[in-house]
């Protein structure tokens, strides 16, 4: 299930739960009669209609009765509307949280066809969510380390469950996750190398993680590990996102300048395929900057 789909399901469940709470407070108070509004000489008059159909006029002296009947009318209509909306939300959840093996949307159709027939079928265009899910699972070689436990460097846990190397990286990861932007953290990347798609690489769970490349060694000191590899689902364009977090440190600046020069020399362009954020001890990363980049490049 894609990240964006998970977020939508959670939001629908929250809305449904909120409607449950509203409905608990909307039980109309017991009582006979309902309020009727009638036009009379350019004004509106209120009447109480009893169960037997008889009507009695309500003057301004009966404001408490008018308020009680109007409140009962509002609660009755609100209850029906809330029940209708809750039923619609539950129907959506029934589709999104379909049982395993059920076919309920276009992404499931091919999977439901006999495997021996699939080579003869030309599938239609992949949806954005389906493309993003496949990209998230099988696009790149990831750094080979434990991704669900801390190590000496990766101390900061993200909303998605990754451990990253700084608070600023955690902020970027959490804003990507909150906006439903697919991302990989610290992929193994050699700018000068090209992937060999005849040599697949699988992660610790047996899923396709990417492809080997001649000269690519995830442990080599010459292998780069860009902070993030991110995807715009709409345009299907991927970007490297590097965060330069210690610009007050000359050694750090030199090392990262060399990294960026390698990437640029390999044909990648800053602002086109490479996104940069930065900070120093006096100028911390601004959340607004992260959101501006997400809005401009990844939406």
Image: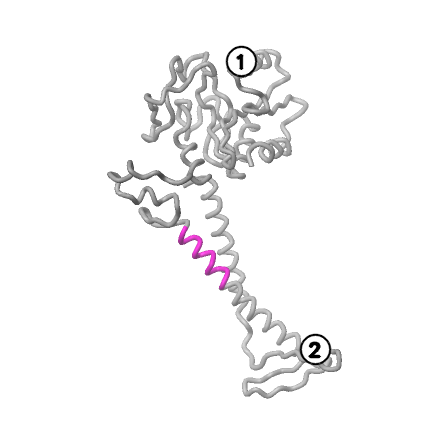
Q: Which mark is residue 265?
A: 1
Q: Residue at x 60, y 31 (%)?
A: 293
Cα distance between the residues tagged 1 and 2 = 80 Å
- Determine the image quadrant of residue 77: bottom right
x and y percentages locating residue 97 in the rendered image: 39, 49
From the viewer's perspective, tell me whether residue 239 is left or right of residue 137: right
Judging depth in this view, the residue of 179 and 168 nearest the camera is 179
Q: Is residue 16 above or below residue 78?
A: above
Q: Secondary structure at mark 1?
A: helix
x and y percentages locating residue 251 in the rendered image: 58, 11
For the image shown, how many numbered marks are present on the structure?
A: 2
| Magenta run includes residue 17 | no
Q: Residue at x 55, y 72 (%)?
A: 28
From the viewer's perspective, tell me whether residue 84 is left or right of residue 285: left
Please state which of the two labelled residues, at mark 1 or mark 2, is closer to the viewer.
Answer: 1
Instruction: Give the magenta part as a residue range.
Output: 84-95
Q: Is residue 216 above or below residue 124?
A: above
- Residue with the mark numbered 2: 63
Which image quarter is the N terminus in? Answer: top left
Q: Earlier in the sequence, mark 1 or mark 2?
A: 2
x and y percentages locating residue 80 in the rendered image: 52, 67
Q: Residue at x 48, y 34 (%)?
A: 182
Q: How crowded is the residue under tag 2: few (<14 C-alpha within 10 Å), some, or many (20+)? A: few
């Amino acid at each position: 299930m894609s990240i964006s789909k998970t977020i939508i399901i959670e939001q629908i469940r929250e809305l449904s739960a909120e409607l449950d709470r509203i409905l608990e407070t909307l039980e109309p108070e017991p009582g006979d009669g309902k309020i009727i509004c009638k036009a009379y000489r350019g004004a509106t008059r209120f009447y109480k209609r009893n169960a037997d159909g008889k009507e009695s006029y309500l003057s301004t002296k009966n404001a408490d009765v008018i308020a009680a009947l109007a409140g009962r009318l509002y609660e009755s209509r609100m209850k029906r509307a809330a029940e209708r909306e809750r039923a619609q939300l539950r129907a959506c959840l029934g589709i999104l949280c379909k049982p395993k093996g059920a076919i309920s949307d276009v992404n499931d159709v091919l999977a439901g066809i006999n495997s021996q027939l699939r080579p003869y079928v030309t599938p239609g265009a992949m949806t954005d969510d389906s493309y993003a899910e496949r990209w998230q699972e099988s696009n790149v070689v990831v750094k080979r380390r434990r991704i669900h436990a801390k190590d000496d460097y990766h101390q900061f846990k993200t909303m998605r469950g990754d451990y990253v190397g700084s608070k600023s990286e955690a902020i970027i990861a959490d804003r990507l996750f909150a906006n439903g932007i697919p991302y990989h953290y610290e992929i193994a990347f050699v700018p000068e190398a090209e992937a060999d798609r005849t040599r697949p690489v699988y992660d610790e769970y047996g899923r396709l993680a990417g492809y080997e490349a001649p000269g690519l060694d995830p442990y080599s000191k010459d292998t780069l590990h860009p902070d993030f590899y991110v995807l715009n689902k709409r345009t299907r364009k991927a970007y490297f996102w590097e965060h330069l977090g210690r610009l007050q440190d000359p050694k750090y600046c030199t090392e990262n300048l060399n990294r960026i020069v390698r990437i640029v020399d390999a044909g990648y362009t800053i602002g086109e395929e490479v996104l940069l954020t930065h900070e120093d001890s006096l100028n911390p990363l601004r959340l607004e900057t992260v959101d501006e980049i997400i809005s401009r490049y990844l939406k």
